[in-house]
Image: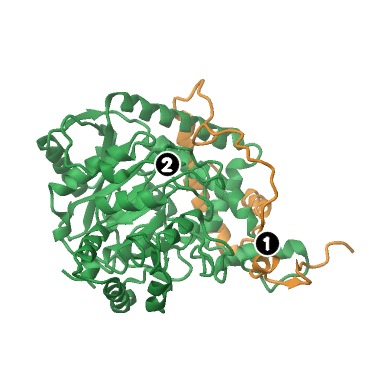
Chain colours: A green, B orange
Amino acid sequence: MEIYELTVHELLEKLDKKEITKKQILDSYASRISEKEKDVQAFITITDDNLEEKLNNVSSNPSKFAGLPIGIKDNICTKGVKTTCASKMLENFVSPYDATVMEKINAEGLISLGKLNMDEFAMGGSTEHSYFKKTRNPWNLNKVPGGSSGGSAAAVASGMVPWALGSDTGGSIREPASFCGIVGLKPTYGLVSRYGLVAFASSLDQIGTLTKDVEDTAILLNIIAGHDSKDTTSINHEKEDYTLALKDDVKGLKIGVPIEYFGEGIDKEVREAINKVIEKYKELGATVEECSLNVAEYALATYYIIACAEASSNLGRFDGIRYGYRSKNYENLKDIYKNSRSEGFGSEVKRRIILGTYVLSSGYYDAYYKKAQQVRTLVKKEFAKNFEKYDVILAPTAPNVAFDIGSKIDNPLQMYLSDICTVPVNIAGLPGINVPCGLNNEGMPIGFQLIGKPFDESTIIRAAYTYEKNTNFRKNKPEFKK
Amino acid sequence: MQVSREELLHIANLADLKLKDEEIDTYLTHLEEILNYANIVNSAPIEGLEETIGMNDNENVFRKDEVVPSYKREELLQNAPEEQSGMFKIPKVMN
């Protein structure tokens, strides 16, 4: 196996046995980037320069991770390196501060190899809405990598970084992880600080991990989780060691499978793959039962109301005054606002701002926004009811595998419907993890999702780890089909 | 859900966005489609349910009102499209 194919825990083992050096690891990733980035287009900014110097700078850091590489989604603020949100609006923005997760990453001495592509302001499910480039799926370069953390998922899947950070507002970690055949965790709302994450929908956004396997997920979650006084929605939850959950054991675990997730809208091969997962869990000693979670459609409608409403407010700050794009075409202050926003935002971002402004405007607030906030309560209650009986809920991550680039770009509603399996988890603030479980007949990855109780990341990590240990998805490798 | 051209332009104006003529028709179609779908929330069994506003039970998160070092002015101005004398520069607001 090449170094760039290894997981982080495998790299650590080899370092421990002195079979490889950190310099070799960094070089292996840098040469992988120079080989594959031209096909995959995962990065907006590459920072693999002066690696030897960067490695020297962390030589006194006692962390075992010091000097290992990582990739960062480009909506997470990094001091001194551009944070563009894949938008013309922030094309030249250099954050004067680090996001809290970056302070944690830097404290461990991890070296960022770059900022990863995404849908503009994280709005999208295919990474086609980036202002800069379209990222390609490493399994088939004509397919989308998913989104919005498509650059993060594609970079990990193609071995250009060993792991990456992403963000998930309605599935933006889990869906691309599923499309690219890797593991993606969206933690419970409030477990990871959002300070320095460029806000899209503040009550739904959560930073999480994209990794090659479940063990790396637990390791990276250990690094980024924790209360932060700079984020008032972050929770003062007792610090846990998620690697303790890495046990090959699901005996007695109660898994609920919502029948609503197996309807007509779900691709046949996806359904078949998930059914095999269910059989596997039964074989491993878990109890698997059908349950009902009849909220998916309500949750999706609610999501697009709430997320757009919050986005219309959050993106109000982009006015061409303090930072970001300023139109050259203006005579007065109002012109600056209007022209900078109209020229600086892409079409999907504008669409969502308009939709959000609409549902918040007088006359429609009660019909849409207020109802959506009540539906959110309904969704939370439905999950809570199921969690009285089950430890975890199992469902497909996406209704389909990665689709062709360009095939949904002109039909926003069609694109939104792809989020139907992931969105309820954000609406209820729960943790969810994508685990790869096979390839379809075209060789594209299929993933399933495990949903846990609030702050019970440990149980979904244990269940995911057990499945992974007893199957062998990683024997499949992306082929960069053209 | 029928959205009129005037309504769309009004909403865009509220959001400080100017739409080009060729954008207007596309946005109208998309907005109608999406709103029709979003209408499902009106048939959800939500009678008597409270609204969920925040995702967790945090409320009134206080901190001590202490003076701490802040960012340097130059650092915060480095992203400004235009600045003058250490301040953000905007066109004249009053005649």
Indicate the chain on which mark 1 is placed. Answer: A
**Residue A105 rendering spot, x and y as whole percentages:** 42, 59
**Residue appearing at x 59%, y 51% in the figure:** A314
Where is A377 relative to B12, above or below? above
Image disc number at residue A426: 2
Compare residues A194 and A102 and report the one nearer the observer: A102
Judge from the rendering whether residue B4 lies leftward or rightward of residue B89; answer left or right. left
Label 1 vs 2, first from the N-terminus: 1
Judge from the rendering whether residue A188 lies leftward or rightward of residue A470; answer left or right. right
Image disc number at residue A81: none
Which dot, 1 or 2, sits closer to the camera? 2
Quadrant location of the C terminus of chain A in the rendered image: bottom left
Judge from the rendering whether residue A199 lies leftward or rightward of residue B81; answer left or right. left
Compare residues A27 and A61 and report the one nearer the observer: A61
Quadrant location of the N terminus of chain A in the rendered image: bottom left
Indicate the chain on which mark 2 is placed. Answer: A
**Residue A437 visible in the current orientation:** yes
**Residue A446 rendering spot, x and y as whole percentages:** 22, 52
- Crowd rating for badge 1 (residues with CA inside 10 Å; few <14, some 14–19, many 20+): many
- Crowd rating for badge 2 (residues with CA inside 10 Å; few <14, some 14–19, many 20+): many
Compare residues A242 and A428 and report the one nearer the observer: A242
- Quarter-of-image position of residue A474: bottom left
Q: CA distance from mark 1 to mark 2?
A: 32 Å
Q: Residue reaching furthest left?
A: A283
Q: Which residue is mark 1?
A: A338
**Residue A36 rendering spot, x and y as whole percentages:** 29, 75
Q: Residue reaching furthest right?
A: B95
User: Is mark 1 in CB contact (under 8 Å) with mark 2?
Assistant: no
Element under label 1?
A: helix
Q: Amino acid at mark 2?
A: Asn
